[in-house]
Image (tube, rainbow, N blue to C red):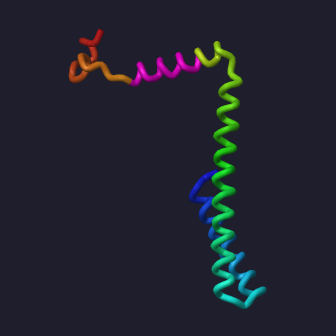
Amino acid sequence: MFAPRFFVSMLGALVAFAVATYYLTGSFVSTLVQTLICAVLIQVGYFVGVLFLVWKEAGERRKLSPTKQAATVEAATEEKQSAKISLRRVGRPRHFNS
């Protein structure tokens, strides 16, 4: 659910909805109110969709066995350690690093 693509698609759907509603009702005020209600409903649907994806991902992470979770945490820790820069090596030629 890529947000910019969603908002462009939502805008397109709202414009189509507004045109159809105006054609059917002939009332600008009614069209505006109904389009705003439609926009709120679309936003609520998007929010619920994102919550569902987060809930689903959390459930998948909980399903990992404790050994896999430990391995995942250990791998992340090792990655953070390798990303750190040793201050004693900064500015020294490579052949002096030990």
Residue that protrudes farthest toward the right in the picture: 24
In this rendering, the answer to whether 20 lies above or below 91 is below
Q: Is residue 82 magenta?
A: yes
For the point 68% across and 82% down, the residue is 31
Task: Give the main secondary structure of the magenta stretch.
Answer: helix
Residue 54: image location, x then y, percent? 64, 40
Residue 2: image location, x then y, percent? 61, 52
Q: Is residue 52 magenta?
A: no
* Residue 27 location, quadrant: bottom right
Q: Quadrant of the C terminus?
A: top left
Residue 89 or residue 30, whichever sits in front: 30
Which span of residues is magenta-colored?
71-83
In this rendering, the answer to whether 92 lies above or below 51 is above
Residue 24: image location, x then y, percent? 78, 86
Residue 27 or residue 64, whichever sits in front: 27
* Residue 52 location, quadrant: top right
Question: Is 35 displayed left or right of 88 in the figure?
Answer: right
Residue 53: image location, x then y, percent? 67, 42
For the point 47% across and 18% down, the residue is 78
In this rendering, the answer to whether 82 lies above or below 38 is above
For the point 65% across and 78% down, the residue is 33
Residue 46 or residue 29, whichever sits in front: 29
Residue 56 or residue 74, whichever sits in front: 56
